[in-house]
Image (tube, helix red, strand yellow):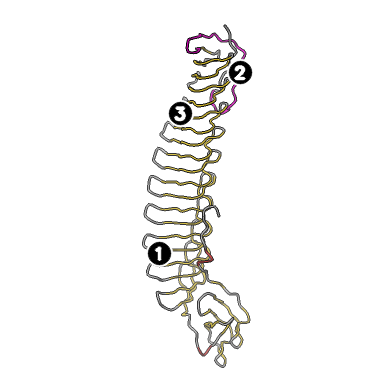
Amino acid sequence: MRYKLGVLNKSLSLPRLFYTLAGTLVAVLANGAELSLPNGDTYSGDLVDSQRHGQGVYQWREGNRYEGRFDKNRMHGEGTFTWSDGRNYTGDFVEDRREGFGLLVWKNGDKYEGGFSNNLLHGQGRFTWANQDVYEGSFVDGRRSGTGNFVWASGAQYSGEFKNGVLHGAGTYRWEDGREYLGQFDAGAKQGRGVFRWPNGNRYVGEFDADLRTGQGIFYWRDGTIYKGIFEKGKQHGWGVKRQPEGPLDAQFWDAGTLIDSHRIEVVPRCALQDDGQAWMFHSDECLNGLAHGEGLAVSEDGDLIIPRARIVLGKIVHGDAIEMPDESQLDTPRIGD
């Protein structure tokens, strides 16, 4: 008796099955058939209309093995595929593709349990590495993409958005030593607005670039001291305002973390300066008839605005570029999905 029997793809990396018209000698048994194909592969299981259909076992000459359901010569339904390199997949198949839900285990102990599409990790799933790192969340085309939770064996953890396998979007990262960052990520680095907290109670709210505090920000010390200003590469840089606990305000100028200049923000009666209904401090040796007059540093009494080179005429600001100090309400941290 001769049968037309398709030969399964060896590697499963190309999901289509190949067919041959070569005849094969079949031993028909009570519970199915056993046969050897001309290329050295073997099959044992159900045949319907000369095709693998039902339950069966297909063994490749090179060592790969499939045991499970077939439909018209294709792996279709529940089954187990074992590679010669030690990998093992148990789960759903659709027309020779891993499709649906399954468990994939690597020889080194890595394992994934979750959704599959077109042979790739896709949908919701849980990946556990041999070193006990764990990711649980969304996968797209084989990579962590979407929202998920990653817990490292070291104790660090991240909850938030991923793209192409890395932290990307809004999320929260916690270090094993208690530090925490809540904010925006770009290609794995802190980027955009965020909040960074230290275990000792210190806190930074502001902008980040390439993992470092860069841009407008506010630093809160645990003793109540607050600094508002500009940061660059993790250090105070440029103009800012510092407030001691229940104390006065100081306008400060920094260069890469080094304090260059500092002035107490206080209105001087002999150099009165008003703008938009608010009193200003004017730091200059030039005053006229009790009014600010000339060029110098001007700072609003509340410390919200600084004009490094203000031009004043008889108590009125006529020229100068104002630097607005950051306000925490302007530095709202993006949330997941924003």
Q: Is residue 247 left or right of residue 229?
A: left
Q: Mark 3 highlights which residue?
A: 88
Disc 2 element = loop
Residue that badge 1 annotates: 202
**Residues under labels 3 and 1: Cα distance?**
49 Å
Q: Residues within 10 Å of mark 3 (few under 14, many from 20)?
A: some
Residue under label 2, please give it: 19
Is residue 240 found left or right of 153 in the rendered image? right
- Disc 1 or 2, which lies upstream in sequence? 2
User: Which amino acid lies under the numbered mark 1 shown in the image of this protein?
Assistant: Asn
Q: Nearer the viewer, residue 179 or 89?
A: 89
Whether residue 309 can be seen here: yes
At 45% from the left edge and 56% from the top edge, which residue is drawn?
181
* Above or below for 292 versus 70: below
User: Is 22 within the magenta?
Assistant: yes
The span shown in magenta is 10-33
Which corner quadrant holds the C terminus?
A: bottom right
Place of residue 41 in the rendered image (x, y in percent of width and height, measured from the top left): 52, 16
Q: Which mark is residue 99?
A: none
Q: Point out residue 250 in the picture as x, y percentages from the top left corner.
A: 46, 77
Question: Which amino acid type corresponds to the residue marked 3 in the rendered image?
Answer: Asn
**Amino acid of disc 2:** Tyr
- Residue 338: in magenta span: no
Query: Which of the 4 image quarters holds residue 133?
Result: top left
Residue 129 at what x, y percent from top left? Answer: 42, 39
Q: Provide the secondary structure element on which disc 1 rests.
A: loop
Residue 208 position in % (x across, y down): 51, 59
